[in-house]
């Protein structure tokens, strides 16, 4: 069943906090839910579908339904794929709506690893019983090392340079200066990135995303409902999801599962990368963006470094504006899961509601893409193509 045009994103909300001292995870989920419903012009009593991941406390969706006050639920999904979970949730919500299982779906993310004193792990994910743990235990498991391996391999294969990686961070900083909630608002240069401390060769501190608390929510509805709400209508035109794993150690680090998820999303939407006016790309590290640009078809394999150079990702300057809220590199990476915020800024751009300094003119077709897991081990990619009616 195709979901093309069968569901719309009718409401969005991003929590303004970047450190949630004194706010519980459950309260964050409730606040982002109410914020998105208010944006859509709907109420809790309208929601009959709920989608959340392992960051939802207690029994996940069951607990949050009670806490938030979702009394009319007839469909629920707690898919967990790390940072890409929310692309999959929007896809699954659109599928459920198209199949008649629900009419108004709520998707929430909320977490507080900083306030809770946590590290880079994902809340609700128990890594102690992974079948591959005995083989990984002798090796440092911080995500940084895995992404550094992917970056170094890309450099070896294609001649990608540290300066090209740095341009991704520079573009994000040019956008973050206009976001009052961004954690890092200072505009930086390539030299600034290269002067930051080396943390895992070849990645430097400024090649890495921020860590924050916070969250966000999305309301997905039937088109007939969306048209009654008086808000700009953003249709879900295509979606794709795919998994990549290590194949027992026989892994090619130069590509991601986005090769499959992107192709599926573009095919369903009936459009090509050249038609996309704006791209929200998962930016856990600068290399993540370069790989995604190649895998989604915005440039040829190996050309990502050259594609991002000289400000090509900066709104009003380059060919493909990306992450105009500052993204995970500068603004927000709530609960170490950046997929939700990618959807939110893509919807803002499609509505024409991004900051005027970074709003892309005639932004009728946008892409949001997330990667959950680790590029150097196993991960799931999710891609959404959204369009303004």
Image: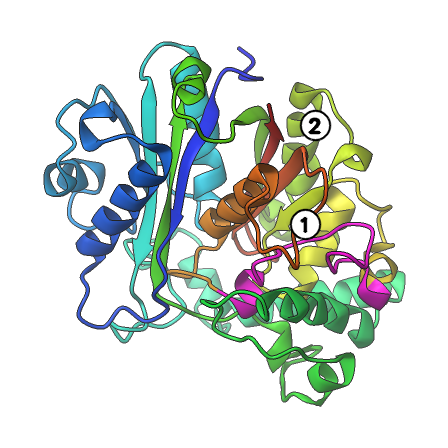
The nearer-to-camera label among 2 and 1 is 2
Checking the image for residue 250, the label placed there is 1
How has the structure been colored for display?
rainbow
The reply to whether the C-beta atoms of the residues labelled 2 and 1 are less than 8 Å apart is no
Q: Nearer the viewer, residue 289 or 32?
A: 32
Most common secondary structure along the magenta stretch: loop
Q: Nearer the viewer, residue 241 or 125?
A: 241
Per the rendered image, the range of residues in magenta is 309-331
Residue 114, horizontal then vertical, whole percent? 32, 73
In the rendered view, would you say 177 is above or below 251? below
In the rendered view, would you say 370 is above or below 328? above
Q: Is residue 224 left or right of residue 240?
A: left
**Residue sitting at x 64%, y 73%:** 207
**Where is residue 275, by image quadrant?**
top right
Residue 27, horizontal then vertical, whole percent? 18, 54
Mark 2–mark 1 distance (CA, rounded to whole Å):
28 Å
Magenta stretch encompasses residue 146: no
Residue 303, horizontal then vertical, whole percent? 87, 54
Q: Is residue 286 left or right of residue 153?
A: left
Checking the image for residue 266, the label placed there is 2
Checking the image for residue 282, the label placed there is none
Disc 1 element: loop
Disc 2 element: helix
Comes first in the chain, label 2 or label 1: 1
**Residue sitting at x 64%, y 71%:** 173
């Amino acid at each position: 069943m195709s979901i093309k045009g069968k569901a719309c994103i009718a409401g969005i909300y991003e929590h303004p906090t970047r450190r949630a001292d004194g706010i519980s995870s459950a309260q964050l989920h409730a606040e982002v839910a109410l914020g998105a419903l208010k944006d859509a012009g709907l109420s809790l009593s309208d929601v009959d579908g709920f989608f959340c991941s392992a960051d939802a406390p207690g029994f996940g969706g069951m607990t949050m339904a009670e806490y938030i006050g979702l009394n009319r639920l007839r469909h629920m999904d707690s898919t967990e794929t790390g940072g890409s979970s929310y692309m999959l949730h929007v896809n699954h919500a659109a599928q459920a709506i198209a199949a008649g299982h629900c009419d108004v779906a709520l998707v929430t993310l909320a977490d507080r690893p900083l306030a809770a004193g946590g590290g880079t792990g994902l809340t609700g994910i128990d890594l102690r019983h992974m079948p591959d743990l005995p083989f990984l235990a002798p090796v440092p498991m911080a995500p940084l090392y895995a992404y550094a391996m992917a970056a170094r391999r890309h450099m070896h294969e294609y001649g990608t340079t540290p300066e090209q990686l740095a341009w991704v961070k520079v573009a994000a900083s040019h956008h973050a200066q206009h976001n009052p909630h961004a954690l890092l608002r200072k505009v930086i240069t390539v030299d600034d990135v290269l002067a930051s401390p080396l943390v895992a060769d070849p990645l430097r501190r400024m090649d890495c995303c921020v860590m924050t608390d916070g969250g966000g929510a999305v309301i997905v509805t039937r088109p007939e409902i969306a048209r009654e709400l008086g808000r700009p209508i953003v249709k879900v035109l295509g979606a794709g999801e795919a998994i990549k794993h290590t194949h027992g150690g026989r892994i090619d680090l130069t590509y991601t599962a986005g090769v499959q998820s992107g192709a599926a999303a573009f095919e369903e939407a009936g459009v090509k990368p050249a038609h996309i006016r704006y791209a929200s790309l998962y930016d856990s590290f600068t290399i993540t963006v370069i790989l995604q640009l190649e895998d989604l078809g915005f440039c040829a394999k190996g050309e990502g470094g050259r594609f991002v150079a000289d400000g090509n990702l900066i709104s009003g300057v380059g060919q493909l504006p990306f992450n105009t809220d500052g993204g995970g590199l500068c603004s927000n990476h709530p609960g170490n899961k950046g997929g939700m915020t990618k959807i939110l800024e893509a919807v803002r751009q499609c509505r024409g509601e991004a900051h005027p300094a970074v709003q892309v003119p005639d932004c009728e077709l946008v892409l949001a893409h997330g990667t959950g897991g680790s590029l150097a081990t196993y991960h799931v990619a999710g891609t959404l193509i959204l369009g303004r009616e």
